[in-house]
Image: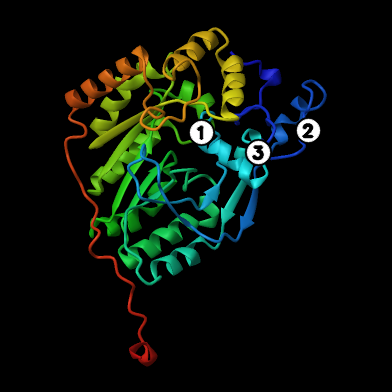
Amino acid sequence: MQDDQQYIKGRGAQFNPGNRFAAKHYTQEEGIDLWEQTDKIETQIFLDKSKTIINKVVSADVPLELSANPYQGCEHGCIYCYARNTHEYWGYSAGLDFETKIIAKTNAPELLRKTFEKKGYQAKVLSFSMNTDCYQPVERKLKITRQLLEICLEYKHPVNILTKNALVLRDIDILTEMHKYRLVHVSTSITAADDSLRKVLEPRTSTIATRLKIVAACAAAGIPTGIMFAPIIPGLNDADMFEVLQRAREAGAFWAGYTIVRLNGAIEAIFRDWLEKNFPDKTEKVWHMIQDCHGGKVSDSRTGIRMRGEGKIAEMIRSQFKLYCHKLGLNKESHPHNLDDFKVPFKGGQMSLF
């Protein structure tokens, strides 16, 4: 396991790899002063005025149409997060920068309202947290996600939420009201059966038990809810699949999904470093099993394959997941969103008649 003298506790990535878009970057030699500063690496919040808030989802691998991300970067620090690479577009590293330099889109509510009021806009399901978690710690203070949900309720716009943070239950009042119009699904991602793995894999996320409470609370309110067992890291968390699915079903989940880990771009080096420091005895086994799922590589961008993998291990995972879901009664119900009630609220006043 990790050497406590040389490990940045509470963070996923343990270093900053170079930014592929930067002409220059610096490196810091281990042993000079980095490890003396490990307890002083604080999260920085940068307020940004964005130009857009809604993105069209064009990937054939993701059955979504629209997404919104009020934050860039994520303090949760999940070591495997595919969104790490997007932080390079902002001039930062996909490593420690991704989880310590958070960009908050403070004008997101204004942008969302303007988008909804554009002539010809047609409502489609808007998914939150498809890149970074909309309920990460900074949301507790800034409440940007809550404001976005209030607008979605006002305009009767359908929403999907996926989160690893129990902060979502703060907004159960809005979510319950949205559910009256069949406007919302709320799900959580669970990657392990116990917190010993979660603490190093996803260091600043809610506990497994707390995430199951998200499912239970939403189910109790009648809100359609489910989980993503994702990503599956063969040799590390794949054996937890049945227990996670069973506990989620018992909590009230009606659906479940999964992906297999893929280590594109800078994530490859970040994850390998993390793996060697936390599971040195398993490093080579896990690495080779990931490669087995991606044609001999750890990264994969092939449409139709990149999310689920291929090969014997990927096929075994696929078969097990299908069997477990059938046994537990998952993925048998359908709860479509209401797309018909979207409308721009009447503003009132005499001038609005002309």
Q: Quadrant for the N terminus, please.
A: top right
Whichever of labels 3 and 2 marks the residue nearer the N terminus, that label is 2
Amino acid on which the number 3 mark rests in the picture: Asp
Q: Which quarter of the picture shows residue 91? A: top right
SS for callout 3: helix
- Residue 348: % across, % down: 35, 85
Q: Which residue is identified by label 1?
A: 81
Give the mark nearer the N terminus: 1 vs 3.
1
User: Local crowd at mark 2 within 10 Å, few (<14), some, or many (≥20)?
Assistant: few
Label of residue 26 in the image: 2
Q: CA distance from mark 1 to mark 2?
A: 23 Å
Q: Are marks 1 and 3 in contact (CB under 8 Å)?
A: no
The quadrant in which the C terminus is found is bottom left
* Residue type pointed to by label 1: Cys
Quarter of the rendering containing residue 302: top left
**Horizontal and vertical percent position of residue 49:** 60, 61
Instruction: Look at label 2 and name its amino acid.
Output: Tyr
